Image (cartoon, rainbow, N blue to C red):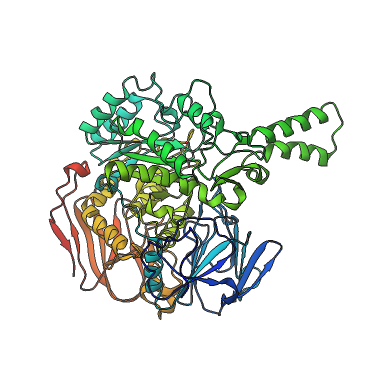
Amino acid sequence: MKTCKTNLINDSFPPAPEGITRYTSGQPIATDAAVCCIAAESINDFPYEHCFEDGRFVFSFPLEKDEIVYGLGEAPRGINKRGWLYRSFCSDDPFHTEDKQALYAAHNFLLHKGSGIFIDFPGEIRWDIGYTHADEAVITLFGTDFDIFLIGGGTPSDVVRRFRALIGPSYLPPFWALGYIQSRWSYHNAEAVKSVIRGYDEAQIPLDGICLDIDYMEHFKNFTIDREAFPDFKDFVSEVKEQGIHLIPIIDAGVKKEEGYGIYEEGRDKGYFCKNEDGSDFEAGVWPGLVGFPDFLRPEVREWFGEQYRFLTDAGIDGFWNDMNEPSIFYSKTGLEKAMEKAVRMRGRDLDLSRFFELKDAFVNLGNNPEDYADIFHEIGGRPVNHLKVHNLYGASMTRAAGEFFEKEFGKEKILLFSRASCIGAHRFGGIWFGDNHSWWSHILLCLKMLPSANMCGFLFCGADLGGFNGNTTPDLLLRFLALGVFTPLMRNHSALGTRDQECYRFDNPSDFRDIIQVRYRLIPYLYRTLHRAAEEGGMMFRPLSFDYPSDPVARECETQLMLGEECMIAPVYEQNASGRTVYLPEEMCFIKLSGERITEKRILSPGLHYVRVALNEVPLFLKKGKSIPLCRPAMRTALLDTATTEILSW
Ligand code: MIG
């Protein structure tokens, strides 16, 4: 009997559930993604076709004609990942278009033919899922030290449950975090925050939280407050708390390099920042100018950084979002110098076209440059480890730094935390948002498709920037986005610097927005229970229809509707100027429209295709036979919510 002998999966952990096999190659870096003790089998016994090639590990498996491949969590494209090339490499890419291979996360879990594959490896992975050859999946790990877990057969839901037992329980937020949250880059000062609260209150639209983006800080320095903008921050936090509003400040990964800034000096003096090969601190430019990146992979650095949040929790803050932790780099000190040198060399010369582009690209490619990532070094067990080997663990480790501090200090479910970058394992410490989407209609569906995939990987508390982050929204887009967001655990409206105002009360007919957001508050007891149940059972709050109706060929291919909990199906309207949508019912269901405190329609629909009309101020849902959903009365704040059931949806 082999035991787990690596430091990666602790012997003191409980045994893994039946049906999981672990294959180990080399000396894997401890990711702490798995929380169960499993004997390590040799990679030579790995049942898929595989080989080692140029320091990479490649394995493949055939794809049958009608087979669906699920997984990869927060990633571009569909619920069914077939027919595209994906990449696990946490990336700050603000254009979530179809041609992309990666977003901010690296969720290395696939589910196909009733079994799961979890690749516990923090370096880059390339997933060719029927891209090169439609009938074959080829997966390439850029490294040879890894664990792969195969999670044995059953229904997709069984596999997910087993996988989730392996990776441990999902993060759960405090109750208030299920309320509606308004965000913008940025509310620059206390007055701006107050006017948002006033705007929502006057329009009688519920609100529970307001995010503070980078401008609340002094020169973008983490754990500082711009005293001009927020003269008495602590008092201000309690003043808005008294009104039932939680402020949710952002924290960035990089720490500004500045003499006299205590956190920077301490981090530098203790050697806590990531290094260059020669052992000096790696320096890169982000919002604050040059920064040091805390080496979150080291436990002592996590503890130190986590402790810094106390500055804000002491001021009464109980919610945070962690950003720029892929890590996102605008330029590195050496990269910028090289580009400058090139410019100086070329100055005064006659540039032909290729020279010109070379010069231009030297600057255009400064951001998130692979060469810079290759220059960064972490320290693991006292030894330097190149960043590329652990890239996908960086943001996750920042989440862990914060999450562990919060849990130690306040206990579970007390502090709201969501992060941009993540990998599996981080789901135990915080939630995620899906990053910088656009005010595009197609991004309603992109959000919908990521929900079940993220849930599979343990990320239950998640959501997209409702209304869209980049670009200008329109009220109808925001309303339709919100009508999906009514169901997502994180319901946050957020938008970028320089875009059109996106607070609900700014538009014509604010009562439409009230109608939608009130529905959220009526559903909070139900959503809270559904979220908790998914966490307890290792289940998914949102499932593809194919999970529940595996032998229904239409349901199997549906990528615009989701099952929610055990009770219902959701199907948001996702096109502009549409007064409704076509929806597919795999069985007889009751079509219900909610609007404010009203039920505006309730009608039993037969299985099959239907066109349903949905007004901009209505939230549609489809209730299964024999199921019921409790509603309470809406309130302006979760703190004022009487969660007693006042009405039951059933038929
Ligand atoms: O480079 O803090 O995804 O939500 O508003 C942009 C400013 C940095 C990216 C985050 C976004 C946030 C923005 N940040």
Could you say which is closer to the camera, residue 30 or residue 564? 30
User: Percent from the top left, x then y, of residue 363?
Assistant: 69, 36
Image height check: is 424 above or below 157?
A: above
Q: Is residue 398 left or right of residue 96?
A: left
Could you say which is closer to the camera, residue 1 or residue 316? 1
Q: Examine the image and state in which quarter residue 424 appears.
A: bottom left
Q: Name the residue rendered at 20%, 66% in the picture.
A: 628
Image height check: is 528 above or below 81?
A: above
Whether residue 466 is visible: no
Q: Is residue 259 left or right of residue 229?
A: right
Number of labels in the image equals 0
User: Percent from the top left, x then y, of residue 635?
Assistant: 19, 44
Whether residue 76 is visible: yes
Could you say which is closer to the camera, residue 421 or residue 215? 421
Q: Quadrant of the C terminus?
A: bottom left
Q: Name the residue rendered at 65%, 73% in the picture.
A: 133
Extreme residue toward the right, this view = 350
Q: Examine the image and state in which quarter residue 534 appears.
A: bottom left
Q: Is residue 264 left or right of residue 589?
A: right
User: Percent from the top left, x then y, of residue 154?
Assistant: 40, 78
User: Percent from the top left, x then y, of residue 620?
Assistant: 30, 60
